[in-house]
């Protein structure tokens, strides 16, 4: 897992053709807005999280965020434990995000 700030995140996701953005927040949090292009994968529902995680393409790069960075770091660790090699955690989460939301 690499921890990157908002500026690095925006640069990397713009240039990484294999980038997949994952929002691991709850449904209620997602209603407040998401980083454009993100897919929700709620880590607060472990069974569903693992089921969906096992369906993801391990060759892709996963840029993961939550509200403040804790749950997304946990998600990166879980993904790495099942064979994912390219995971990036957004430091400070969406709270410190200085890009667009949708």
Image (cartoon, rainbow, N blue to C red):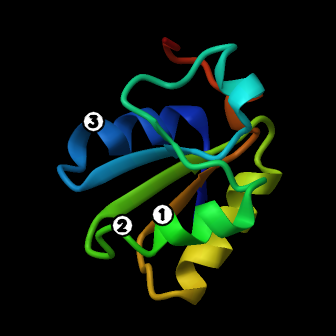
Q: Nearer the viewer, mark 1 or mark 3?
A: 1
Give how far across and how far down residue 54 sits, in percent. 44, 75
Residue at point 52%, 59% (across, down): 88
Q: Nearer the viewer, mark 2 or mark 3?
A: 2
Checking the image for residue 52, the label placed there is 1
* Spatial CA span between label 1 and label 3: 25 Å
Q: Which residue is mark 2?
A: 56
Rendered image quadrant of residue 92: top right
Give how far across and how far down residue 42 sits, in percent. 66, 48
Q: In this orientation, does residue 15 appear?
A: yes
* Spatial CA span between label 2 and label 3: 20 Å
Classify 10 Å Cα crowding around label 3: few (below 14), some (14-19), many (20 and above).
Answer: few
Residue at point 78%, 53% (across, down): 44
Q: Nearer the viewer, mark 2 or mark 1?
A: 1
Q: Which residue is mark 3?
A: 14
| N-term mark: 2 or 3 | 3
Query: Which quadrant does the N terminus fall into?
Result: bottom right
The answer to whether marks 1 and 3 mark residues whose Cβ atoms lie closer than 8 Å is no
Give how far across and how far down residue 40 sits, in percent. 53, 40
SS of the residue under disc 2: loop
Number of numbered markers: 3
Q: In this orientation, does residue 1 appear?
A: no
Checking the image for residue 22, the label placed there is none
Give how far across and how far down residue 86 sits, in percent. 41, 71
């Amino acid at each position: 897992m690499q921890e990157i700030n908002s500026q690095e995140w925006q640069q990397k996701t713009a240039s990484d053709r294999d980038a997949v953005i994952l929002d691991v927040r709850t449904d209620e949090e997602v209603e407040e807005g998401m980083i454009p292009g993100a897919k929700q994968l709620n880590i607060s529902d472990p069974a569903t999280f693992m089921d969906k995680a096992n369906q993801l393409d391990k060759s892709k790069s996963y840029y993961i965020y939550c509200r403040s960075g804790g749950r997304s770091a946990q998600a990166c660790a879980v993904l790495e434990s099942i064979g994912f090699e390219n995971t990036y955690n957004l430091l400070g989460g969406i709270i410190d995000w200085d890009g667009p939301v949708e």
